[in-house]
Amino acid sequence: MLATTNTSDFISLAPIPIFVLDPDSLKLEYANARFLALINGTIQEIAALSLNDILGQDLSPEIYTFFLQLKNASNNTSVPVQIPHMKCNLAPFSGYSYFAGRLEETDDTKLKIAVWLIAKTTLATQTDTSISDQPLINQGSGEEILSDTKHAEKRPNIEYVQVAEESQQTGTDNLLVAKDNIEKSESAEAQQAVSETRIQLETSREWFKNMVHSSPVAMLITKGENMVFDVINNAMLNLIGRDSTVLGKPWFEAIPELVGQPVVDELFYAYRTGITHHVPGVGISLVKNGEPTLGYYDLTYTPLRENGQVVGLMQTATDITEYVTSKDKLQKAYEQIRLSKEAAQLGTFDMDMVTGRLQWDDRCRLLFGISHSNEVDFERDFLHNLHPEDLERINAVLAYVFDKQASNGIYDVKYRTIGYEDKRLRWIRAKGQVYFDANDKPLRFIGSVLDITEQKEDEQRKNDFIGMASHELKTPLTSINGYLQLLQYHARLQGEERMLSTIDKSLNQVKRMTRMIDGFLNVSRLESGKIAIDKQQFEITDLLKEVCEETMTLTTGYHVKLHLADEIMVNADRNKLNQVLQNLIGNAIKYSDLGSEVNIKYTTDNENIIVSIIDQGIGIKPEHQQKLFDRYYRVEHDSTIAGFGIGLYLCAEIITRHQGKIWVESEFGKGSTFSFSIPLITTG
């Protein structure tokens, strides 16, 4: 066991866990109350245990080397240094860093090593744990995560702990023995004892000061009710932004900015009551480099006594400013997310792909017509509440999203729901992300849902109007076309070449107008769900030949080349693919100079046929390429090129309904390549 000395008194009073080891065997010989409270044990239970046994794990060779070097150090310094490579992942030691220092008090005292446990205050560990343990959303209003965050940030009330250990009080009394008692002895023998006691007192004081200075924790010793700075280490000087000139000054001269701050009340409470207490997370404004700086600190006040009377305080402080401010920022971020979510009326979902457990917040439940707060089920509550016409499409989309190689887990879809309880039809826009493990297996599926019913109803009204107007426009156009054909016939009979040229131009304009009206009608039908995909098996090379021949018949001045390969069978809507090919080839001609070449090629991979239309036209700038397939989007290269930006939109919708993809590759000024892929016929 450690002998009762001034150093053991200091270790007993220390506000951090400390234990003392034999340097040869690394077995425990002494521990203070803080360490015993940490392990919830007694000194009798842990005495003579090795460091391995205490930490519950084997020590690395580097740690043994460190202790050997510390034991054999030529200097006699007791300044603690951090033990390299020493960390413990087991409770209760996982939250500490470890420091060690030599203990050499007298010539007849054997060398000991003190190990100091300094609590870590990093935010990252605590934040990572709190986030990873929480799902993205919770049942209910979604405020549970926020309430948990607020709870973690809340400052605990001050806890007062009465110092009851008589051994600590006695030890402190020995450190501050009154000289008056020594001077009362008048005998020569007593005078000798007084002299020896005075020497011991001074030695004790020096050792006490050295232990304070060597502490890695910010420490300060004050004397008297004016809190005169008596001993202070560099860690505390750095923390308060001062130098050693504060020694000998009362607190209101050393740190005048503390006047009026609540921490002063805690100082005087500890001094006047003699009660040791801990003040967690207190905000203190200190002047550093001439500027007031608000910081947050964990403080501990330990009264020091002489003959049973409090004559000073030992104060320790840990700077937790970064932790507190980061928590504040995190709380504000959660609040902004919550407000944004409420303002946008977003619902959220979170699905554990391993267990199949699905969580919906209140808004998401509302959009599926659910009012209860019971656990939801993917099959019962999601798939069964989809509109029957959307079910097959959404299942295909989900299969695609859960394939990392195909989709990278990106989820963006629109569908209709029929409320389970209210039977109300709603349009939903859902966006999300699937997260995968190292083997590309889906782990978690999270995202948000938005009610777009009103937007869809507006679009439906607009489409109805466009459909009605287009039908009405086609009637007079049909009559105009008939009259022009009749005039064309009579002009040919009479040989009126000038009139024929004018009539031909008029007929071409009528055809262009008819195509535009048909495009509007197709958009209206598509978005009303009135265009169905009628899949049949056919040989796609025949369709490509047919479209090329028709294009060359109707278009002059361009070279359209079809590069044939093997015959390929597909299961698709022939008429709809015909429409896609005509649109893409027509655009290639429209945006190319007269005499240019348009090439049509196709290839296959294991699952799809890929058709490409390659032109030598004006090309498309990168900023326009992602928007080309949006409805009504046009790149205004030349105002003389007619169009309303619906052709490529229709192509994209048709290809998507074939479970395919469409894209463009282009370099401005050098031409474009439009490609689409659709699945091949699967066998077996």
Image (spheres, rainbow, N blue to C red):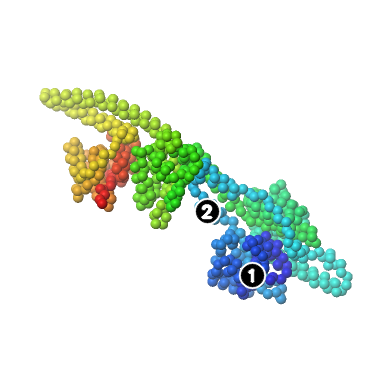
Which of labels 2 and 1 is toward the front? 1
Circle 1 residue? 28
**Point 85% across, 72% down: residue:** 190
* 208, 668: nearer the viewer: 208
**Could you tell me if the residues under marks 2 and 1 are in contact, i.e. CB atoms within 8 Å?**
no
Element class at badge 1? strand
* 423, 569: nearer the viewer: 423
Q: Is residue 332 above or below residue 512?
A: below
Amino acid tagged 1: Leu
Horizontal arrangement in the rendering, residue 467 relative to residue 221 (left or right):
left
**Point 29% across, 37% down: residue:** 532
Rendering quarter of residue 115: bottom right
Q: Is residue 358 above or below residue 480?
A: below
Element class at badge 2? helix
Pointer 2 or 1: first along the chain: 1
Q: How many marks?
A: 2
Measured as percent of width and height from the top left, residue 587 is found at 26, 39
* 183, 403: nearer the viewer: 403
Labelled disc at residue 128: 2
Horizontal arrangement in the rendering, residue 483 relative to residue 249 (left or right):
left
**Point 64% across, 51% down: residue:** 281
Which quadrant, please, contains the N terminus? Answer: bottom right
Measured as percent of width and height from the top left, residue 288 is found at 64, 52
Amino acid tagged 2: Asp
Measured as percent of width and height from the top left, residue 652 is found at 31, 40
The 10 Å Cα crowd at callout 2, few under 14, some 14 to 19, many 20 or more, is few
Q: Is residue 462 above or below residue 628?
A: above
Residue 516 visible in the picture:
no
Horizontal arrangement in the rendering, residue 618 relative to residue 163 (left or right):
left
Residue 42 visible in the picture:
yes
Rendering quarter of residue 229: bottom right
